[in-house]
Image: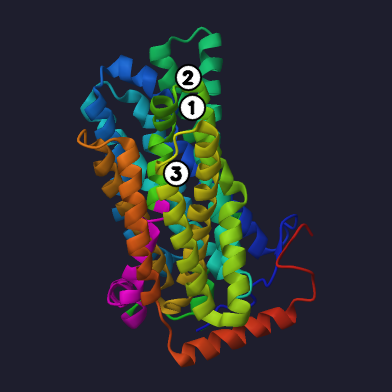
Amino acid sequence: MEILNKANRIRLLNFSTPQMRAFHFSWFAFHLCFFGWFGIAPLMAVVREDLSLTQTQIGNTIIASVAITVIVRLLIGVLCDRIGPRKAYSGLLILGSIPVMGIGFANSFETFLLARLAIGAIGASFVITQYHTTMMFAPNVVGTANATSAGWGNLGGGTTQILMPLIFSGLLMLGVSETLGWRLAMVVPGVVLFITGICYYRFTQDAPNGNFEDLRARGELPQANGDSGAGQTFLAAAKDIRVWALFVVYAICFGVELTINNIAAIYFFDNFDLTLATAGMIAGLFGLMNVFARTMGGIFSDLFAKNGGLKGRVRWLFIALICEGIALVAFSQMHVLSYAIGIMLVFSLFVQMAEGATYGVVPFINKKALGAVAGIVGAGGNVGAVAAAFLFRSEAITYQQGLFYLGLAVLVLASCALLVRFSPETEAEEAAAYQDAVGEDTGAGALSLR
């Protein structure tokens, strides 16, 4: 069954409709989850001294925080199909706030590792964000809605780098020691996550016409059993080769973005003789591109669909991936700082547009197993990050060589996008749905302020 009354335009300053409340709450919640997920990263210099961590131990905690997300993303997508995004997000935010605040009790490498492992679960918030906006927006703007909510959420990775040190410094000014300061600083994102979880439950709903339990009671949505049960929907998604093709695609775009976020600062520091502060500022530019780059990927996906249908969406995804790979190879060969920064920004543009383009395709793979599809594809991003992390842990190759090999891998694996194909019946059905959504929209443009 189709979800009715989806919005055919994104009205950014309108908070009165369930569609726009879901849009704003989902990206804001995802943004906050980044604070909890990576909030400890800018404080690691202090944590390292306090817990006497080695470089290898720090690397292992980073891998653990990303790896656990793979499993949770697989599970959370199926959970969305079963109980709806409202309950799933609220539960994840409230439960996720506990290890975020609890990491302050860590007193050894082992307890710190377990805390980061538990915190990594909130990285699954991305899947719920994409699921909820897909429930709320029509085919003519769903790519833009998914890309924008994810992009503004990803910005949390950048703002965390700025705000967490400020929170820590503020605590020191109050007379708190460094040892206690980093522990108390992590309480702040934990408390905000907890409050947001309550607000998400209170002010959002699963779909434009109500929550899943109401839709099922009215017969507007299949019951979560039989062919629509969690196990069956996951199997349906897992048996589809297109899902695994997009799994690989997301590994070579979002997985690459997570990798660059981890190594960009030290790469500029080592290769261009910069101070840590300057290298960090330059590296921060990569993440700040999320303000608009991922949104552009979704906008182009919707535009390509206007004339090319679902084939157009796949075609744009392939183009974005190829451009990403070329830019990454070029970036790895830059030896002049100004050129390196310029190429990095071009690379950042295409890697984030590729992410937006990926989730411009995901909503159309299997509508009966949307959560399972979104979860598997989302997990691919973290698998890519873990694989790349092992590449850059090796002392046998330099970071520059690692980036070059990673760029080549992107170029080769971009062909996986071409495995995503749709039947003529599905193409015709979605083309008609797109035109119906466009016909209902009397406004100017898919994204507006009113």
392 vs 24, left or right, is: left
Tell me the kind of residue under disc 1: Ala
Badge 2 density bin: few <14, some 14–19, many ≥20, Cα 10 Å: few
Tag 1 residue: 279
Contact, CB < 8 Å: mark 3 with mark 2? no
Element at label 2: loop
**Residue at 65% from the left image edge and 57% from the top image edge:** 21
Q: Mark 3 and mark 2: span between their CA atoms?
A: 20 Å
In the image, residue 444 lies at what x, y percent? 79, 69
Chain-order first, disc 1 or disc 3: 1
Element at label 1: helix
Residue 341 visible to the viewer: yes
Badge 3 density bin: few <14, some 14–19, many ≥20, Cα 10 Å: many
112 vs 351, left or right, is: left
Badge 1 density bin: few <14, some 14–19, many ≥20, Cα 10 Å: some
Vertical arrangement, residue 271 with respect to residue 391, above or below: above
Q: Mark 1 and mark 2: span between their CA atoms?
A: 6 Å
Element at label 3: helix
Q: Mark 3 or 2, which is nearer the eye?
A: 3
What's drawn in magenta, residue-wise?
226-254
Contact, CB < 8 Å: mark 1 with mark 3? no
In the image, residue 313 lies at what x, y percent? 52, 73
The quadrant in which residue 101 appears is: top left
Tell me the kind of residue under disc 3: Phe
Chain-order first, disc 3 or disc 2: 2
Considering depth in this image, is 186 or 333 the residue closer to the camera? 333
Was residue 231 drawn as part of the magenta stretch in this picture?
yes
Tag 2 residue: 275
Q: Please give the count of numbered marks on the rendered protein.
A: 3
Vertical arrangement, residue 108 with respect to residue 229, above or below: above
